[in-house]
Amino acid sequence: MYLTFPPSLRARFLGAALVLGGCAALAFVLFAVMVPQTAKAEVSVEALPVPDAKVPPGASLETVTAFEVTSTQTLNLYDITVHASGTLNAVTGVAAVYLALDENDDGYFRSGDDPIIGYDIFSDAGGTQVATLSFGERLLQPGVRKRFFVVVDLQPWATLDATFGADVVDVTHSPALPVPALPVSGGELYVTNNTAYMRLAGPLPTGTKSLSPGAYDVALTEMQGRAYGHAMALKSLTFVDDGDGDPSAGISQVEVWLDTDVSWDFDRDRDTLLGSGAFASGADSLTIELYDPNVNGPPWFLVDEPRWVFVRVHLSQNAPGGETYRLRVGEATVEFAPASGLPITASPLYVDAPPPDPGNGNGEDPGDPEDPGDDNENGDNGEGDGDDADAPPAESSRTATLLFCGSSHGGVTSTWALMLLLVLLLLAVGRRRRRSERVA
């Protein structure tokens, strides 16, 4: 026995089925397209560029490797495993190896500011020289970037003309997540005591700095100069740009200053301007000759008396927006000795695109004229981390979340309108079919 329904009722069932099926299909498609896929959980360990350097036997607190750690979820960091590389016997030639946290986030290991959180000595493990450095069960929050340094003390009897490096080969953490970038390596130390030289050391890049055209007195980088063997003078510095912009159009001035008051902090009123210059049109390098009026010549560096040199830049008022300048100290001329520790790479400088003209009639949002962003008149615009230049749009991930919650947040209203239009269309089709069946 079969149930039969009149044609009008069958048409209603068909119309309702079409409406429900269409809505379900549309919802599924929109959900699949607009809702972002969950990112794969993993730990990111990124090596930072540590330049090679000459060091004497007995050198202390020398940075050999630097790296940053981020995670997609909350993580407990326990320790790292370091393998020695190079020709130096690390078991007998390295007195101690340390793990330090970049507490002040300036990209430079400072023994008075950055805490040492792990310590070990190298041991031989089947021909591999190994050390294990503890994080001290440090908690890492999702998306938070932490920077660490591997620092060593050499023995006074470290072999001359030997090289030493440190590779991070493992990071112990929980929960266990993949770490695809390991191992990470740093620079190489060359142990020497035969020649005099000047060691230049500067901070590592700490992220892109986002600036506006005309930004004044921006901190590009700083360097500590240390003389080995005998006193020597720093005569010039050469800057090289590898960015996508024309430095002659975007950077109006590069200045080199000496830390005259020995404060380790830049002070325009108390420190000494050694020289300045601007990139020539079409040029990607700039050499600045240094002159210290206090000694009527280039600045001198005495043995065991390190001095700081600061590099500041001014952006042009008409600096093109959307361009990035990647400057580094590529060369240094030292009187009576060679230079070591170069290149020193500065954090990239990104020039924000100017806001749209509110009077252009195209309906674009001119932005908030009261918000100066990272820029101010006292030079602090160069001190921030500048990560906002690379930040993705914040609204893209929220749209999908709000889509099926009845929100009218930008763009979602049009989606609901499309769904309503489809429902009305399907209802109209069902009604037309019912009428045709009645006539039949």
Image: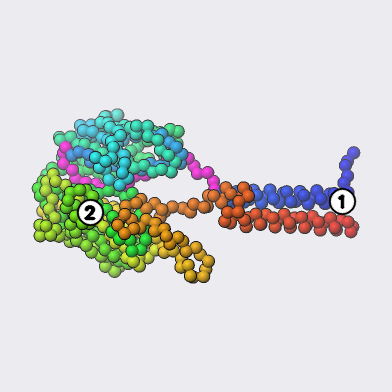
> In front here: 183 or 391?
391
The residue at which mark 2 appears reads as 267
Is residue 37 a member of the stretch shown in magenta?
yes
The residue at which mark 1 appears reads as 7
Residue 54 sits above or below residue 132 on the image: below
Please state the horizontal and vertical placement of residue 294, each as a whole percent of the image: 11, 57
Residue 83 seen in this snapshot: no
Is residue 32 shown left or right of residue 190? right
What segment carries the magenta color? 36-58
Q: Residue, x 49% and y 70% (percent of image)?
A: 360
Q: What is the magenta segment's predominant secondary structure?
A: loop
Q: Residue, x 43% and y 62% (percent of image)?
A: 369
> In front here: 47 or 136?
136
Q: Residue, x 24% and y 37% (percent of image)?
A: 152
Q: Quadrant of the N terminus?
A: top right
Which one is closest to the eye, mark 1 or mark 2? 2
Residue 416 seen in this snapshot: yes
Q: Quadrant of the C terminus?
A: bottom right
- Of callouts 1 and 2, which one flags the residue occurring earlier in the amino acid sequence? 1
Q: Which residue appears farthest toward the bottom when viewing the image?
A: 360
Q: CA distance from mark 1 to mark 2?
A: 90 Å
Residue 376 sits above or below residue 117 on the image: below
**Disc 1, SS:** helix
**Disc 2, SS:** loop
Please state the horizontal and vertical placement of residue 333, each as a whole percent of the image: 17, 56
Task: Tell me the kind of residue under disc 1.
Answer: Pro
Q: Are marks 1 and 2 in contact (CB under 8 Å)?
A: no
Question: Count the marks: how many?
Answer: 2
Is residue 67 a member of the stretch shown in magenta?
no
Q: Residue, x 60% and y 51% (percent of image)?
A: 407
Task: Tell me the kind of residue under disc 2.
Answer: Asp
